[in-house]
Image: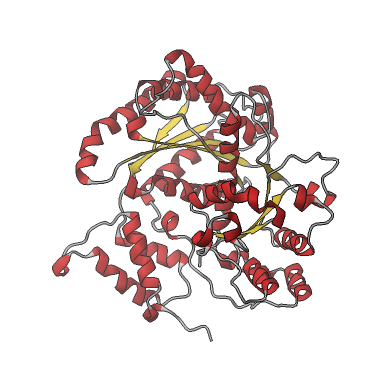
Amino acid sequence: MGRYVFVSHANEDKPKLKVLIEVLLDAGIELWIDRPEELGLGERLLDGGRIKSGVDWQQEIRRGLEHAGCVLFVLSRASNSSTRSDELFREFEYGKISKKLVVAQIEPIDRAELNPFFRIRQAIDLTKPISGISSQAAMQARQEVLVERLREFSMIDGSENQPQCDPDITKWHASAGQIGDANSVRRPPRLLPYLTNRYEQQRHFTRVLQAELDRGNSRPITFVATGSTDDCVDSFAEQVRYMRLPAILKSNGFAPDVLYRRLQWPIHDAHVGLPSDNNLGYLLEDVKSQLYDTLAVRSTADFEKKLADTSVSCLFHVGFGLADWQGLQRGLMLLWLQWLSQLDLSLARHPIITLISVEYPSGFFRRLWYRRALNRIRLDFRANSSEFGAAVYALPELRTVRFADVEQWIREYVENVDREVLRRLLRQHFVRKLGWGERRLSMYEAAEAVKSALVNPTVRIGTS
């Protein structure tokens, strides 16, 4: 079972949760919820978990909590009420103690009315409007923040987040009448983002970022990554976010923590299209407002001041398809990069990094078809960089996975299997028919091969 999210909520709120739950499911978040049929979702949640009929519901809830990667506490008038159930209080307390709690507020609650127990926790307020954009767009933006926050926990390997390692958690288990097994088996982390080290791209990213840090430049640093659908550009962005960037920051004496935000970039709509050139400024304000919202500010001056005061580095991610790159997109990106380069970050103590990922359809012939467009986008970014002196760097194009990449992944992340048997099983996927030559696989193909091999009984190691 994957690193699912345990949804802690008041029963009275079930009718209000269906839309939010569907958003999370559509984003690929695995959920555990006690009675999904009461939300009208039926069997859709069974991958994450639920209370089955005929079992002890308290025991099932505790088991669901123990194995969850995260506890999503839904803050509402009902869950804030002093008449809430003790079980709901324990779920909140468990998430807080185990340091895997995310709070989503679904109803406006006056601060004076907010229970002091909840007041000290930072909540993702799904009810709060965002200046300058519609209420629907504001809701979508905050839902995306919630999705990204939950994904952070789903990226964590289970062994690194086992509650039994914390004495306070052991105490919690004792109060609940159940002590967990402290010798749980380590599971490999999610496959796609870490399946390959992307040596060429990471070396380039590291070299450029290190040079900028050595120069002591306070300007934002922008990287452009391109790749096909099968090369998983977004997964490369996750790899930078969770592995490469924290390692570089730590080696330079910075805190390894990263404040991440994926920006909703306006793209071409086949039916509506982008607004005219005269409205590019409006679109830029929309993108800027997302940054302001990330740091809870309202203006560029406040944004600059907050960046100077923040104790972590920032990574802002923009992603779109190559087919969306046309005149208006180039104009909007030029305005965006100009605005970034003009920020006064002379007092900023930590790097500000933007990663732009551009994806195109996979396949040999499509790759040839899009070659000209790829060259054009590289020229566009290079020209923009020289025009106003912004730090914009194009990373080498992402490639499909080699067997050496999978071997490196096995060495670094897989601990509870027979590695030699695993290598032999995987090798056959990279060798052509008749046993000669070696080919590359897409990240999805390689991930499927690894998953199939890991469930093979011949590669397991006994845990007795």
Q: Residue at x 53, y 71 (%)?
A: 186
Tell which of 386 and 161 is nearer to you: 161
Q: Coloring scheme of the render? A: secondary structure
Residue 259 seen in render? no
Q: Residue at x 55, y 52 (%)?
A: 151
Tell which of 272 and 263 is nearer to you: 272
Left or right? Give the position of 122 relative to 442: right
Left or right? Give the position of 106 relative to 373: right
What residue occupies the far bottom of the structure in this picture? 464
Give residue 321's position: percent from left, percent from top.
Answer: 37, 36
Q: Residue at x 61, y 58 (%)?
A: 38
Q: Residue 59's quadrant in the figure?
A: bottom right
Left or right? Give the position of 71 relative to 177: left
Above or below, 265 relative to 231: above
Q: Residue 368's quadrant in the figure?
A: top left
Give residue 246's position: percent from left, percent from top.
Answer: 55, 49
Tell which of 4 and 336 is nearer to you: 4
Tell which of 327 and 419 is nearer to you: 327
Residue 161 seen in render? yes
What residue occupies the far top of the structure in this picture? 278
Give residue 403's position: percent from left, percent from top.
Answer: 30, 62
What residue occupies the far left of the structure in this picture? 434
Above or below, 132 relative to 45: above
Q: Residue 307's quadrant in the figure?
A: top right
Q: Residue at x 61, y 31 (%)?
A: 135
